[in-house]
Image (cartoon, rainbow, N blue to C red):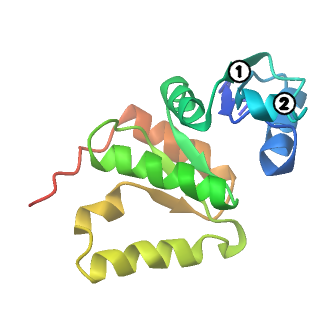
Amino acid sequence: MAANKTALVFGGGKVGLMGACSDAVLAGSGHVIGVIPEFLRDKELAHKGAQEMIVVPDMHTRKRIMFERADAFCILPGGIGTLDEFFEIITWRQLHRHNKPIVVLNTSGYWDHMQGLLQTIIARGFAHEGHSHLVDFVAKPEDVIALIEHELAAPKPAVVFKV
């Protein structure tokens, strides 16, 4: 990200995979923007190296600010919070609240079950076939930025769902 002069907008924490990701961006002289709820900052979980740290009152505001500041979204392996953010951002795309790229980094098949679940939801008629075009899955980190840059240059048409 730093080499591409791409800023990282993230949840503001110093721990876990996103803490390591922000450390890497900073090590490459990149720009890091954290958005952290006050209750997590107060537990001393905020990343001290971020050039910008936006402290918000709650998780809903955090997600809204991250959404507003980001041009694209990359979902890394994660837990329940990651799933919450993923489903919200894909739902907003489905509802035409944005048309920003969404890329899932499926390292070592971590998100294979998620990809299968989305296909099952479509196959069983609980989502339209167009849902498969709302998000892209890639296996290698080096494919993320190229895919995002391609979609930013030539945005996908909004998916129209038949009711």
Name the one closer to the observer, 79 or 25. Answer: 79
In percent of width and height, residue 110 lies at 67, 71
Query: What amino acid type should be assigned to the residue bearing mark 1?
Result: Val
Q: Secondary structure beneath disc 2?
A: loop
- Quadrant position of the C terminus in the picture: bottom left
Name the one closer to the observer, 54 or 27. Answer: 54
Q: Is residue 99 above or below residue 138?
A: above
Residue 55, numbered label? 1
Q: Secondary structure beneath disc 1?
A: strand
In percent of width and height, residue 104 lies at 56, 57
Which image quarter: residue 49? top right
Which image quarter: residue 73? top right
Q: Residue at horizontal 55%, vertical 26%?
A: 65
Q: Is residue 60 above or below residue 133?
A: above
In percent of width and height, residue 140 lies at 67, 60
- Quadrant position of the N terminus in the picture: top right
**What distance separates the C-alpha of mark 2 from that of mark 1?**
9 Å
Give the tally of numbered discs. Answer: 2
Q: Residue at horizontal 52%, vertical 53%?
A: 86
Q: Is residue 123 above or below residue 114?
A: below
Which residue extends farthest top? 51
In percent of width and height, residue 108 lies at 72, 72
- Look at the numbered discs 2 and 1 and tell me whether their residues touch, using CB distance below 8 Å: yes
Query: What amino acid type should be assigned to the residue bearing mark 2?
Result: Ala
Left or right? Give the position of 75 relative to 116.
right
Left or right? Give the position of 129 relative to 33.
left
Residue 156, numbered label? none
Name the one closer to the observer, 41 or 17. Answer: 41
- Residue at numbered disc 2: 46
- Which sits earlier in the primary sequence, circle 2 or circle 1? 2
Badge 2 density bin: few <14, some 14–19, many ≥20, Cα 10 Å: many
